[in-house]
Image (spheres, helix red, strand yellow):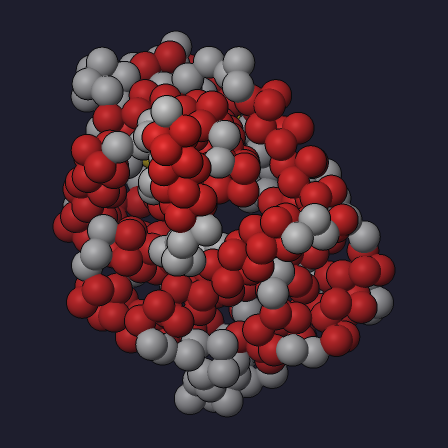
Amino acid sequence: MKQTLLLAAVLLSARLYAQQPAVLLYNPLQLETIKKDLRQKDKNSIAMLASLQQQADSLLPMKPLTVMEKAFTPESGNKHDYMSQAPYFWYDSSKPNGRPYLRRDGERNPEIYKITDRTYLGKLETASRILALTWYFTGEEKYAAKASSLLQTWFIDEATKMNPNLDFGQAVPGVNSGRGIGIIETIALTGIADAATLLKGSTSWTNNNEKALKNWYAQYLDWMLMSKNGREEHAAKNNHGTWYYAQAIDFALFTGNQAKARELVAESKTRLDSQLTADGKQPLELERTNGLGYSTMDLHGWFTVATLAEKTGVDLWHYQTSKGASIKKAFDWLLPYAMGEQPWTYQQISKYNSKTELYPLLLKAAAVYKEQVYLDKAAKLGSNENNTLVRLLNGS
C-alpha cells in the first residue's frame, strides 16, 4: 500500500513539475518559475496563488455555458450556430419597423445583450483560464474537472456544442443575418486554447477530449479561411484584420498546422505595413469615434500576433515596415496620450480605462523590450481587479 501511494506521489510530482507547458500566449517559462517559487514558499507567489484559488473556488458551482441557452434562433434554424447582433446599429424610427438599423459608431446598443452567445463565450474564457491555471499550480483535480466540464459542454458534447462557424455573427437587423466583422468576437478562443493546453496531464481532461477540441478548432480555422465571412475579415484593413491574423495564427499553431501559421505570419507583415504611418500613427483607428480605444485595441492585436509569430521563428517585435514604422514605435507614439500625459486631439466618445486597456500592454512591452520606463508607467496606473491574470499573461 505504501509503495502504491509513493508511486502515485512520484507520478503526480512528475506531472506537475515536468517540462514547460506548450502554451501559446502565456509565458511558459514564467509559469514554471512561479511553480518553482511556490515550492520554495515565495511569499509573493503564495499571495498570487491565494488570489487565483479564491477566484477558482467561486467558479466551482458555475453552471456550464452553451449556445443552446439563447432565447433566439439564427436564420439556419439551428441553435448550435453562434449568433450575435452588431453593437453599433440602432433602431431607426424613420423606417418601417425601425429597419434597416442605423449605424452610430462607438455607441453600443444594449439590445445586443439579449443574445447571450458572446457574453457566454467571454465568461467561458475567463473561467477556463482561472480554473486551468489553478490546477496547473496546485494539482488539485477539482479545478481541472470543472474546466473540463465547461469545455466539453461548449465544444464537444453533441447536445450542447457550438458549431464551428460564425455565419451569424454581428448581424444588422434589416440588412443581413451575419457579417465577417463578427469574427472579432471569437478572440476568446485564443485564451481557451491555452487553458486547454494547461489541463494536459489531468485525469479529467483526456486525450480524447484534447483530440476533439483540436478537431473543432481545425474546423473553425478552415471556416475562417474558406467561408465568405472569413475571407471578408481576412481582407479587413483595420483592427479586424489584425485580430483575424491573431486568431488564425493561434488556431493554426494550436492544431499543429505550422505551415499555415508561418504563411499567415508572413502575410501579417504586409498588413502591418499598411496600417502604420512612419511615426507610428494608426490612421484607420484614429478616424473612429473612439480613436484612443481602437488604437490601443489594434496594438493589443499586434502584440498578440508578435507573441505568436515567435513560435514560428519570426521576430515581429523589432520588424520595421517599408516606412520605417514598427510595433514599438506605434506603442511609443500612443503611450503619452493613453497615460493622460498629453491631450488627445482625436475623438474618444467613450471613457478610456487605462488600467484595463493599457496596463497589460505596458507589462508585455517591458517584458519584450526590457525598458524600465514601461514598468514605471505600469506602476503609476496601479493594478486592477484582474491583476493576477493580467500579470500571468503579460509579465516577464
In the rendered image of this protein, does residue 195 appear above or below residue 312? Answer: above
Quadrant placement of the N terminus? top left
Q: Is residue 249 left or right of residue 164?
A: right
In the rendered image of this protein, does residue 387 appear above or below residue 246? Answer: above
Q: How many marks?
A: 0
Which residue ends up furthest to the front in the rendered image?
2
Q: Residue at x 28, y 58 (%)?
A: 253
Residue 225 is situated, as x and y percent measured from the top left of the image, at: 19, 53
Q: Residue at x 81, y 60 (%)?
A: 379
Q: Residue at x 57, y 73 (%)?
A: 368
Q: Residue at x 69, y 56 (%)?
A: 359
Res. 260 visible in picture? yes
Name the image quarter holding residue 52.
Answer: top right
Out of 389 and 208, give the one closest to the viewer.
208
Q: Is residue 387 left or right of residue 27?
A: right
Residue 202 is situated, as x and y percent measured from the top left of the image, at: 36, 35
Res. 102 visible in picture? no
Q: Is residue 85 left or right of residue 293?
A: left
Residue 197 is situated, as x and y percent measured from the top left of the image, at: 36, 45
Q: Is residue 386 left or right of residue 202?
A: right
In the rendered image of this protein, does residue 105 appear above or below residue 319? Answer: above
Quadrant placement of the C terminus? bottom right
Out of 42 and 324, give the one closest to the viewer.
42
Residue 160 is situated, as x and y percent measured from the top left of the image, at: 27, 17
